[in-house]
Amino acid sequence: MSPIWVVLCIVLIIVVLLLLGRSKGRSRTVMMKPFRWPSEQPPAALGVPAGHPARSAAERLESGLGIDFEGRIKDRVLKNSPNMGDDEWNWTWFELKRYFLMCAIMKGVPMYSGKVDAVWHEMLMFTREYEGFCSKLCGVMIHHAPHGPNDAPEQGERAWFDWVYGELFTQAPASGRLWGSFYRAKLPESRLKTLAELEAGELREKWFNANVFSSFQDLSETADYLIHRAKSQLRSAGQDAPGTSSWRGGYDPMLGGTGMLAGLLVINSVTSSDSEFIRHMDEAQTEEQRQSNDSGVFIPPVCGSGSDHSGSDHSGGDGGGSDSGSSCSGGSSSCGGGGCSSS
């Protein structure tokens, strides 16, 4: 080979290496771009729309947590997380309150967020205030306990969490950041079959905190509403879902801004294959919704509580990672039995 060709080959190799280096540098820059917590204040009543059957319960929950109580909890949290800014605190505290509302309505709500769980831990240090808050919200304690090493996981917990969350709350800009990506797991056939075949009263006893409903009419009406919604969505997907709840109507989820993606979760769980599910859910969302719902990380339940991973995506990233890392001190909580308990 002539000297000129050797020189040309060397130059070409150098150019290619420089281009590859720039490309990797840009990728690293994108992947390491820090996440910025939204600066706006979280919505009132936890983002439960006016007219929604859970609205009064959300307002009761908010009124049971005064500024002074919040401030003392925040002080304890900041001792362990001194770099947490006000915006991050506001949204983490907001999502914990959303979690408590879910626990007041449902049995066995898994905890998916290490950050949210850490705030819950500090809140538990104020025993008297915490007990008073729980009593006002649902009449009994919401206990916190870890899952045991031999606890059998139930499939579909993450998909069920996503569905209930989407039926209760309007869009929030930091949800996926704290809970992990939403709408990545299908509802398994076993849960869809149970939803379709059981009567409303049986579903109330199986999955809802029926023991507190006689004292809290808004929680009871919310359970009826959720059962009505689930069965209606199954029928939209072509499933036979006999039985009706005592829900009387009076709230339009399309006008309130809740339930659209949750409904598509049910429909796509019935009609989409595992390989199609995530694509169909992504296509149904706006860019704003995808940014709010996607952390780039699919978070399984903490400490062995299990999840159905059908169609789940464990890859990707949002450039800043996820703050939803699970904590083994977490678990699932409910107001079942004689009092709120973890399972």
Image: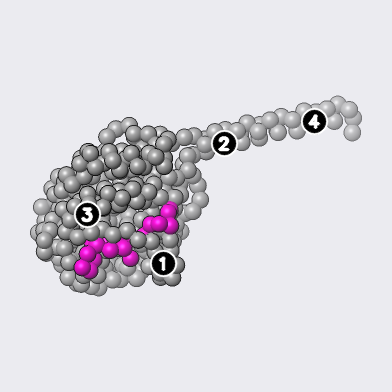
Considering the numbered disc 4 on the image, is that residue within a helix, a strand or a loop? Answer: helix
338 is within the stretch colored magenta: yes
Q: Which residue corresponds to the image point at 23% horizontal and 73% vertical from the top-left?
A: 198
131 is within the stretch colored magenta: no
Q: Which residue corresponds to the image point at 66% horizontal and 35% vertical from the top-left?
A: 20
Q: Which residue corresponds to the image point at 21% horizontal and 45% vertical from the top-left?
A: 65
In the image, the segment drawn in magenta is 326-343
Which tag is nearer the camera, tag 1 or tag 3?
3
Q: Which residue is mark 1?
A: 148
Mark 1 near mark 2, Cβ–Cβ under 8 Å? Answer: no
Which tag is nearer the camera, tag 2 or tag 3?
3
| Among the two numbered marks 2 and 4 on one chain, the one whose residue lies closer to the N terminus | 4
Instruction: Name the spot of residue 265 as percent of width and height, x first.
Output: 33, 56
User: Looking at this view, is 101 or 171 the one in front?
Assistant: 101
Q: Main secondary structure of the magenta part?
A: loop
Mark 3 near mark 4, Cβ–Cβ under 8 Å? Answer: no
Considering the numbered disc 2 on the image, is that residue within a helix, a strand or a loop? Answer: helix
| Among the two numbered marks 2 and 3 on one chain, the one whose residue lies closer to the N terminus | 2
From this viewpoint, is residue 243 visible?
A: no
